[in-house]
Image (tube, rainbow, N blue to C red):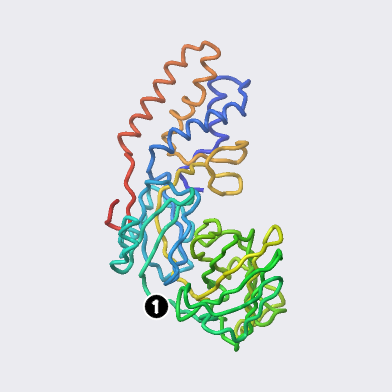
Amino acid sequence: MSNLGVTWTTLYQDAKDIFGEDLDETKLIRSANRLIDDLKLILNTDTQVRVDYIPYVYEFERYQLPDDFKSGGQISLRYDDQIDNNRNRTYTADEPPFEFYNTHWRFRTPEKWNERLGIDEASIVVDKGVEKLWLSNGRGSQTSQEISDCDSLTGWTGAGGAGNLTLDDAVKAKGNYSINFDLTAATAATLTLVLDAVDLSEYENRGVLPFDLWLPSAPSSIDIEVGETSAKYYSQNITTQSDGSPFSTSNMNEVKLAFENATGTGSPDMSSETHFKVTLNFDSATTDTDFRIDNIKAWKPEYLPFEYYSFYMVLNEDSEWAEYLTDGTDESINILPEWRKPFFRGLIVEELRKQNDERAEEFENYYNNWFREIQKRYPNRAKRVGSSWW
């Protein structure tokens, strides 16, 4: 927990010390959440700064921002070759991440980003409620290993309803072709590739394996396998695209297996990988044509730490950031210690009113004046990457 937090136990005890022992904790939690709603709409303070990371892969462009990202919040993005450091940290007021202001990424509007006018360009888009960070034309220095360019049918077989594999030169991501296949009256479409052995050992701990899919019918989930053989492999089940978007039936889908989140079966030797398999799972028997797959590579990403502002101000009992208090047990509200007094005074205004306590108006004014001071001190900031504002 950041040292900026105040535990719910402390705030609840403060309230009881003033009001008495008969307070309803459930009602007070609801009141506290209303006060949190007040704060999260105006604050971009040090109590809300977060640092996370993006596993950046050249040629792979869209990434999901954290669930607690605050739209309109300041963002700073930079390269960091020390990939095992600075992950998921919460910086405090006495530890500002000044180094994160040193960035080569230029923030663009989505329209300008689409023009790809230069290298290291970034944008932020809200698509169907999902905040996406768009990156393009960054460093091309990451290590990669091609699994298949999908320009040949050699080694590919279809199963579980997948058939009629052909090369498609009309719709593709890279190279000359994609692999086109159909699905006939089945709940699964499986493509398996047996290839000459390739060495993926350096990707096993922190690599990703992204590829592109075209889906005329959207599956409920996709299983991805890669490994030494069909009995020794890493696997992952995914239910969205890599940026958190639902599978699309109108545009290319960017999907990936991330080795750090994959499950190992049979202790695979990744220095001799010969097996790759993709299975599209459907809730009911499906028939459709022109499914496509292309551009399958393993990458060792560059982790891009970025600073952002969050509207999640509660640290729950599992030490995870949350939007609201739930039961109050072992939870903290991420406010400055000096905000403790005005916060708990605002917390019990409603209860004081019910008792016709003359302190109700006094405490409400105390809270409102404090809140106005915060608004003056911490105005909302525009989105920012480096020195570029939007």
Residue denoted by label 1 = 141
Secondary structure, mark 1, is loop
Report crowding for label 1: few under 14, some 14 to 19, many 20 or more residues within 10 A (C-alpha). Answer: few
At 49% from the left edge and 79% from the top edge, which residue is drawn?
177
Q: In the rendering, at what x and y percent does residue 115 appear?
A: 31, 64
Viewer-closest of 289 and 174 = 289
Q: Is residue 265 above or below residue 23?
A: below
Instruction: Please provide percent x and percent y for residue 42.
Output: 38, 37
Question: Which residue occupies 43% across, 50% down?
Answer: 126
User: Can you see residue 298?
Assistant: no
Q: Say if 382 sits above or below 179 in the image.
A: above
In the depicted view, which residue is nearer to us: 158 or 297? Answer: 158
Q: Quadrant of residue 335?
A: top left
Q: Judge from the rendering whether residue 277 lies leftward or rightward of residue 335; answer left or right.
A: right
Q: Which amino acid type is marked by label 1?
A: Ser
Is residue 40 visible in the rendered structure shown here?
yes
- Please, is residue 44 above or below residue 287 in the view? above
Q: Is residue 140 left or right of residue 147?
A: left
Residue 104 location, x and y as percent? 30, 65
List x then y, in percent, for residue 54.
45, 62
Q: How many marks?
A: 1
- In the rendered image, which quarter is residue 119 located in? bottom left
